Amino acid sequence: MDETTSFQNLLRKLQEPFPSEIVQHRKINGRNSSYIGTDAYVERLNDIAGEYWNWTLKGEPTVYEKEIMVIGTLDIMGAKRDGIGTADLKYKGDSFTNLKYAARSASQDALRDACDLFGMGWKNLKTISVDRQGAKQDVQEETPLCQKCRQPISVIQQKWLQDNNIRLLFCENCVPDHFKK
Ligand SMILES: [Zn+2]
């Protein structure tokens, strides 16, 4: 490792904006939501961090009634962030029909989440470049976003999370059932 390869250097390069065509859009509950695909994050990690990054799943996936949850650790030069990911499970009768696919999908979701915790993609996803009046301005999003669907979390929901000692950020729609009392 040469002297210029420091964690701060890597981090700064990892946090560079992605080309705008990388950002994907989908509608969740009638609202537009933007995200960056796992492949783009992995490509960025390989390009910038090369052999200095690693992704490991923490324990076995947890299977809940309707979804599977995976926690993984992204390690970049020894700095670690845990990402959490979920995916919906499908049944036929009593057995899952998509367990393998769902586990993989949840793992990818978790890796995206961990990349987010390193600040990757923020310059694309957390900046509103044009406001409703059409005036150009850069507004840094201050409302916490749901870690699953990336929608802003309402003040009431933030309070609910606090009251229930839930440190993970989930909107009303995405709170996993096991958190609900
Ligand atoms: Zn959500």
Image (cartoon, rainbow, N blue to C red):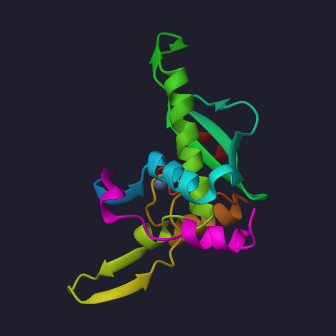
The picture quadrant where one finds residue 45 is bottom right
Q: Does residue 158 sit above or below 66 in this rendering?
A: below
Placement of 84 over or under 49, stated as above or below: above
Please give the range of residues in magenta.
1-29
Going 54% across and 69% down the picture, which residue do you hit? Answer: 15
Q: Residue furthest front?
A: 2
Quick one: 57 or 141, which is closer to the camera? 57
Q: Name, please, the residue furthest toward the left.
A: 134
The residue furthest top is 93
Residue at 51%, 79% in the rendered image: 142
Q: Is residue 21 left or right of residue 143?
A: left
The answer to whether residue 81 is magenta is no
Q: Is residue 109 above or below residue 131?
A: above
> In what quadrant of the picture does the N terminus appear?
bottom right
The number of numbered badges drawn on the structure is 0
Residue 80 in the image: x percent, y percent?
75, 57
Residue 112 rendering spot, x and y as whole percentages: 54, 51
Query: Residue drawn 36% across and 77% down?
Result: 128
Question: Is residue 108 in sight in this rendering?
Answer: yes
Of residue 62 and residue 77, the one placed in the foreground of this image is 77
Residue 4 in the image, given as x and y percentages of width and height:
70, 73
Q: Nearer the viewer, residue 133 or 11?
A: 11
- Magenta region includes residue 12: yes
Residue 175 visible in this rendered orientation of the protein: no
The residue drawn where x is 35% and y is 57% is 22
Q: Residue furthest right?
A: 78
Asked which quadrant contains residue 85, the reply is top right
Is residue 39 left or right of 13 when viewed as pictured? left
Q: Locate residue 18, reporting x and y percent.
A: 41, 64
